[in-house]
Image (tube, helix red, strand yellow):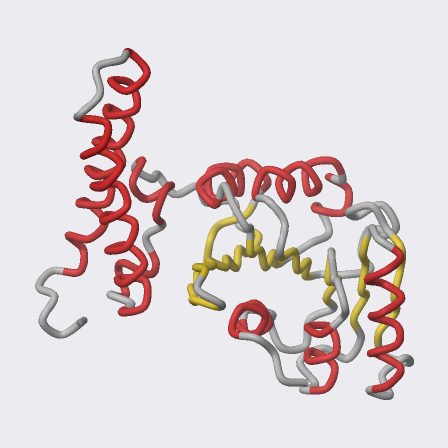
Amino acid sequence: MKLSARLQMNADLVPAGSRTADIGCDHGFVSIYLAEESICDRVLALDIREGPLSAARKNIAAAGLSDRIECRLSDGLEKLSPGEADTLLMAGMGGRLVCSILNNRKEILAETEVLVLQPQSDVEEVRRQLPAMGFQIEEERCCCDGGKWYIAIRAVRSDECRSCTGAEYRYGWILPQKRDPLYYSYLVEEREKAERVASELEKQTTAGAAAGLIRQRHTLAMLSDTLSLYGGTEEII
């Protein structure tokens, strides 16, 4: 199974030997990869829509993996029982929805050791809520796929609660501390976008524009703090 850059990034964060539930499995490509590569002996593939799940079943059967991947029609974690999986993979949905799904089934969360999350939006909200769920971020990855940037998080069960700055919640700390060159490109793009928006807002005189300008300047300050972790850029770009 050849995965896209985004799906490969997500699959790479799944621990070897884990019992994984792929929530929102879509066409089942990551589930198939996890089984084919013997990362997981068994995978539970769940999706809320019958169409994608039917496609997943066909793809799984074509790969000869129907005995190792079980498909379930499920609204979030609805059809998952406590203890069936020690790892939850959730990708391709908004961050607030991810948090809502997890918080709505605390009995499932209590039996989970690892979360692999790739929110399409509101990554900051996910980072903020994970400690309250009993998880600490262990690893983050980023990629650019089809001209869009994606960030994936692996969080592990932990009683520790890291004290984070606003910039760390917004842009993370693991990739900047590693001086990850791809993430540096993402941050530079975000800074350029914020600078363009701020420049346009400076030309306007409405109260809304003034409030927007304050927000953009705050964003630029957080980006500056994050980019400062990279030090000199000579070795990065």
Q: Position of residue 134 (x, y in %)?
A: 57, 43
Query: Is residue 223 shown above or below 35?
Result: above
Q: At x 82% / y 87%, what residue is drawn?
A: 63
Q: At x 85% / y 83%, what residue is drawn?
A: 65
Query: Is residue 216 shown above or below 32?
Result: above
Tally the marks: 0
- Horizontal side of 185 relative to 126 (left or right) equals left
Q: Which one is in front, 192 or 226?
A: 192
Query: Is residue 118 shown above or below 34?
Result: above
Q: Position of residue 59 (x, y in %)?
A: 82, 78
Query: Is residue 91 shown above or below 182?
Result: above
Q: Residue 57's quadrant in the figure?
A: bottom right
- Horizontal side of 67 relative to 138 (left or right) equals right
Q: Quadrant of the N terminus?
A: bottom right
Q: Residue furthest top?
A: 207
Q: Which one is in front, 49 or 44?
A: 49
Q: Residue 91's quadrant in the figure?
A: bottom right
Q: Which one is in front, 110 or 186?
A: 186
Q: At x 67% / y 36%, what residue is drawn?
A: 100
- Horizontal side of 142 relative to 32 (left or right) equals left
Q: At x 17% / y 72%, what residue is drawn?
A: 237
Q: Position of residue 35 (x, y in %)?
A: 74, 81
Q: Which one is in front, 102 or 28?
A: 28
Q: Position of residue 199 (x, y in %)?
A: 18, 34
